[in-house]
Amino acid sequence: MNIFNCPVCGKELIKAEHSYKCSSGHSFDIAKSGYVNLLLSKHIGKAVHGDNKLMVQARRDFLEKGYYSGLKDGLCEMVVRHLDGDCILDAGCGEGYYTGAIFDKLESANIDNNITGIDISKIAVEFASKRYKNISFAAASVFHMPIADSSCDMLVTLFSPYCGEEFQRVLRTGGIMIMAIPSEEHLWEMKEKIYDIPYKNQVKPYELDGFGFIEKKHIRYVIDLDSPEDIRALFSMTPYYYRTGKLQQERLYALDKLSTTVDFELLVYRNI
Ligand SMILES: C[S@@+](CC[C@H](N)C(=O)[O-])C[C@H]1O[C@@H](n2cnc3c(N)ncnc32)[C@H](O)[C@@H]1O
Ligand SMILES: [Zn+2]
């Protein structure tokens, strides 16, 4: 069963062969790859359209090499342990690496699942829907989710924009939210190469309005990047990519290899 609502009038969307339709007559085509575009132009920010093709391809290439498989495994373990129900939403799913991993994990454990991914980047959901055929994907913003109220048992938000009010609205009472955030020393050695005086990440207090904090898991290990392409791909996935001057970027691009710490926290909350 799909959890999409019409972005125009808010009524339930019914899936037909090539489109989703609501009872008011609004219709949204399903792209060849399988995703549906539920983005209204008024909900697309002027400056931010999400990741472009180069960024999505870089992310996929990098993730496929398994550098973040430690995080993926930690996340999947938490999903299995906390899931009560079958409906999961990946809000800001990118090209679907973690969305697909959650599906595979639940399938292999014979756990019923109904997984949906949304992202504001059409190219990201196109990549995702081409690969993960058992998951529903839509282009949509986390700030205006075309998702039915209280329809989700679990929501995951992994390095994507946070919208507490929307996340609370779509989660049922007691539903679980799992969030991944970079911890203090994430990519420390990479930052040492770029900046004269690198700073540690500041981890904000865990409390979030409307949610009860349940637990956290710290995931930390060292990855060995053995090509300039992988170094560049990882760098392009970080916020530093946009904030760093050319000269500092070139210091990094001159490297053939880089070993760097990855340092994450997985935080689990209950919608109260
Ligand atoms: C750092 S990536 C994380 C992607 C994925 N969760 C992962 O970890 O691989 C951030 C994602 O947020 C998406 N994004 C940015 N603004 C968004 C918004 N308002 N609504 C939904 N997605 C958004 C981007 O397109 C991008 O795919
Ligand atoms: Zn409608």
Image (cartoon, rainbow, N blue to C red):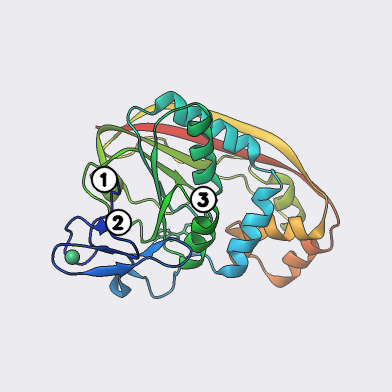
Question: What amino acid is found at the position of numbered circle 2 in the picture?
Answer: Met
Where residue 215 sits, quadrant-wise, is: top left
Q: Which mark is residue 132?
A: 3
Residue at the image point whose x is 49% and y is 39% from the top: 103
Q: Dot 2: within a 10 Å radius of its alpha carbon, few (fewer than 14), some, or many (20 or more) residues?
A: many
Q: Which residue, as the protein is rendered here, is positioned at the far front? A: 17
Q: Which mark is residue 27?
A: none
Residue 216 or residue 109, whichever sits in front: 109
Q: CA distance from mark 1 to mark 2?
A: 8 Å
Q: CA distance from mark 3 to mark 1?
A: 23 Å
Q: Is disc 1 in contact with disc 2, using a CB cutoff of under 8 Å?
A: yes
Quarter placement of the C terminus: top left
Q: Dot 1: within a 10 Å radius of its alpha carbon, few (fewer than 14), some, or many (20 or more) residues?
A: many
Secondary element at tag 3: loop
Residue at the image point whose x is 38% and y is 65% from the top: 30
Where residue 155 sits, quadrant-wise, is: top left
Residue ID for mark 1: 170
